[in-house]
Amino acid sequence: MVQPIPFRPKPRPAARSAVVVGAGIGGLACALTLRRAGLTVQVVEQARKLKEVGAGLQLTPNATRIIRDLGLLPRLEAVAVTPRSLDVRDGRSGSTITRAHYGPATTRYGAPFLVVHRADLQNLLADAAREAGVIIALGADLTAVEPAFGGVRAVVKQGGNLYAHGADILVGADGVRSAVRAHLGVARPPVFARRLAYRATVPVPARHPPDVRLYLGPDAHLVAYPVKGGATLNLVAIVKQEEPVARWSAPGDSAAVHAAFARWAPEVRSLLESAPHFLCWGLYDIDPLPRWGSGRVTLLGDAAHAMLPFLAQGAAQAIEDAASLASAILRETDAAAALRAYEAERRARTARIQNEARRNGLVYHLSGPPRIARDLVLRRSGAGLLDRYGWIYKQ
């Protein structure tokens, strides 16, 4: 006699609903992955209009692999640029120190390296989230995070009125100055890195190859790469600044930029001189937090582990967070346990990347004999330069 197969009901996910605070790249990626996991999701965002700060960003295979798994890679590739190589140059002479081609690394890590305008990525994620059924409420300022009937709720001020958005879990994806982090009682202040970032976009110069170019020099560096289908060049100039600044995406002082790069190679000066204006902000990160969450509340992206941009991992790690959180929700059966499992999975990796980004910030700006030693190491790395960070890309 054939024995009947016992019925084993599929475990219920740890949560059925979520409120995500923040509609940046991390928040939207989180909303989308949670919605794909079956949750009802609402995003609350203080801005009245989705407008991503900055200009361009680099997406490495650990991020594009997740975007591919979400079915969005073709849409991303339609607005992004596939760079040919990473070209590291001496900022003063303009000569190439080393070059690493992305093609072989893309094959090794199973997903592409892409460069994209931040607004294009944010709009893509917002459209995909809305298509999946995510509700995005704009102009909503968070005023409180409260427990509610076995769940949690976000109280927001919107249009002069207070509204409460309840859910099983709440995710703070609201940036380096996170209000959710403050509500959790871990309001660790951001740490100023003694650097200012000046950003601009300019038309791509004639015969400029689709490379990511990194120009290194004492106390400064410049990154340049194409976005917007290759028609626009994204510039990020990093300069030393001892005094802390509170500016965030404020108009930048063009004279200060040109003074910092006055003795650099003609091609560098030409790129900077072609910018009609710059946006400027101070670079901050945060020291590892004692905890990322409590109860049914957790943090994601810069709110949990803001990092300096010297490894191009800020957006990538937020996207990784989103995928990890959704996986934990599906894997666990208790909401709080799922959030703690997500945090445990992510803390060590993001802390290591934070430290490596800080280290790169020092290495980029060396002068004298240390600079010579650095360049020698880079030249010997050659095509294997990207594999130094294989532990990040293969995740």
Image (spheres, rainbow, N blue to C red):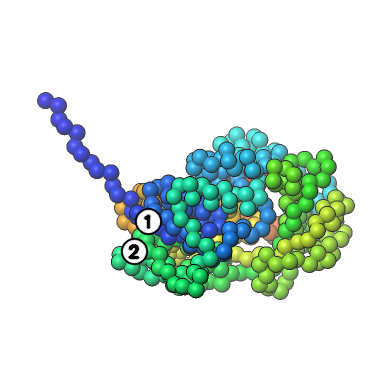
At 48% from the left and 47% from the top, the residue drawn is 131
**Of 243 and 9, the residue lying toward us:** 9
Does residue 168 appear left or right of residue 348 in this picture? left
Q: Residues within 10 Å of mark 1 (few under 14, many from 20)?
A: some
| Viewer can see residue 229 | yes
In the image, residue 229 sits, relative to residue 217, either above or below, namely above
Where's residue 140, x and y in %?
Answer: 50, 66
In the image, residue 293 sits, relative to residue 324, either above or below, namely below
In the image, residue 120 sits, relative to residue 178, either above or below, namely above
Q: Residues within 10 Å of mark 2 (few under 14, many from 20)?
A: many
Where's residue 276, x and y in %?
Answer: 80, 58
| Viewer can see residue 260 | no
Q: Which residue is mark 1?
A: 17
In the rendered structure, find residue 151 and report the number of the disc placed on it. Answer: 2
At 64% from the left and 69% from the top, the residue drawn is 192
**Of 107 and 37, the residue lying toward us:** 37
Picture quadrant of residue 386: top right
Three-letter amino acid code of the residue under disc 1: Ser
Question: Does dot 1 land on a helix, a strand or a loop?
Answer: strand
Mark 1 to mark 2: distance in Å? Answer: 9 Å
